[in-house]
Amino acid sequence: MSEQAHPWRQLLKGAAGFAIGLVVWLTLTPAYNRALAFSARGLLAVIQREPAPEFRQKGREVLVIRPDVAPRSSRPGIPLYDLTFNIVLLTTLFAVNKKSFGDGNVKGFLIAIAVLFLTHVLALTIWTRQLYVSWFGELSANDYGDMSRLLWTRAVLFYRIVAQFAIPVLLWWLLSDKRGEKQVKSRQR
């Protein structure tokens, strides 16, 4: 294969990875979101003094239902689709590797997905804490100070602006099969 055809091949593999990632993400998101909400609720039950919230799916978001808030009050929502879209980025990045379906790349991808799930649990937990410190009026004002509001709000913004994109790139860089690329380069010599 000529050197000029190589970028087009990478582009096509990336586009295919994006399409596959998008279809899988759209198809599995409801089940993934349930697992994510269940895990985040368990983590919140351990780390906070308030009762853990119930997460209820409503369209493209999950509502945060605090048990100590009146049932008729409005419920804030967290857009889990936005929170988890980076799965598509991760799939795209792993698809552009030289041996996309090589054992090392597939193993790295599966490990990366597991780590990404843990970061999603952490992100949902952080976002829920941010809602606890800022959304629930008098309850929030009585239980949390300005520093807590600042900390949790900045943590959510950091995830949304930086970490949401940096985490998949870092996982790909650390876990993708570099040996496959080295083997291809040594054969070209």
Image (cartoon, rainbow, N blue to C red):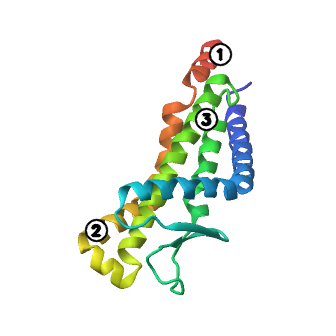
- Which amino acid type is marked by label 1? Gln
| Disc 2 element | helix
| Disc 3 element | helix
| Residue assigned mark 1 | 188
Residue pictured at 50% horizontal, 39% vertical = 171
Q: Which numbered disc, 2 or 1, marks the residue that appears first in the sequence?
A: 2
Quarter of the image with the C terminus in it: top right
Residue pictured at 40% horizontal, 65% vertical = 129
- Could you say which quadrant of the image residue 37 lies in? bottom right
- Could you say which quadrant of the image residue 50 lies in? bottom left
| Disc 2 from disc 3: Cα separation | 35 Å
- Which amino acid type is marked by label 3? Leu
Q: Nearer the viewer, residue 164 or 128?
A: 128
- Which amino acid type is marked by label 2? Ser
Report whether residue 44 is seen: yes
**In the rendering, which numbered label is found on residue 158?**
none
| Residue assigned mark 2 | 148
